[in-house]
Image: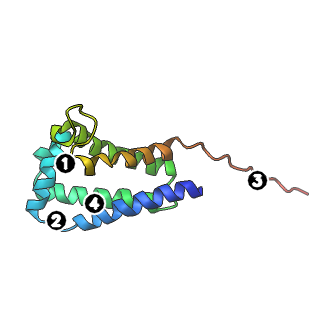
Amino acid sequence: MSISNAILRGVSGAYILQSGYGKLGLPNEAAAGIQGLAATGIPAVADMDSDTFGKFVAYSELGIGGALLAPFIPSRLAGLGLGAFSTGLLAIYFRNPAMTQDDGIRPSQDGTGLSKDLFLAAIAGALVFAPAKKRKKAKNKSK
């Protein structure tokens, strides 16, 4: 793993892992609030039980954060997981009119926090589309 990939994976992985850890044992009311916001971007989550949704979010963030931090997970695979995660967050941002200004792109005061998840999507893209390392072939030492 290159230094640049380690930095991208380390920072985003630690952030997401901490976020997931903070959501463990989330009270039902708090989970329902997050679920209501999430349903604006991903309508299918509205059908879930709020307690189940809270656990799903917490464990998903723990899994994605852990995958980013685990050096034995290939960067492209970790990037795909991060990409799926950040796409969901950006769907909430772009599909909720309260998050953007009238142009539908620039963040409103309420949307500034979520709009920053664009950086996660950029990190995912860097991990997925980074040039593949060429492996050195082992030289046969035959006598």
Residue at x 42%, y 45% (from the top left corner): 80
Residue where numbered disc 1 is placed = 110
Say what secondary structure mark 1 lies in. Answer: loop
Q: Position of residue 14 (x, y in %)?
A: 39, 63
Is 103 situated left or right of 75 in this image? left
Q: Are marks 2 and 3 in contact (CB under 8 Å)?
A: no
* Dot 4 crowding, Cα within 10 Å, few <14, some 14–19, many 20+: some
Under mark 1, the amino acid is Asp
**1 or 2: tag closer to the N-terminus:** 2
Residue where numbered disc 2 is placed = 26
* Dot 1 crowding, Cα within 10 Å, few <14, some 14–19, many 20+: few
**4 or 1: tag closer to the N-terminus:** 4
Under mark 4, the amino acid is Tyr
Q: Position of residue 15 (x, y in %)?
A: 36, 61
- Which marked residue is nearer to the observer: mark 1 or mark 2? 1
Residue 59 tag number: 4
Is 139 situated left or right of 46 in this image? right
Q: CA distance from mark 4 to mark 2?
A: 12 Å
Is 142 situated left or right of 113 in this image? right
109 vs 39, nearest the viewer:
109
Q: CA distance from mark 1 to mark 2?
A: 22 Å
Say what secondary structure mark 3 lies in. Answer: loop
28 vs 89, nearest the viewer:
89
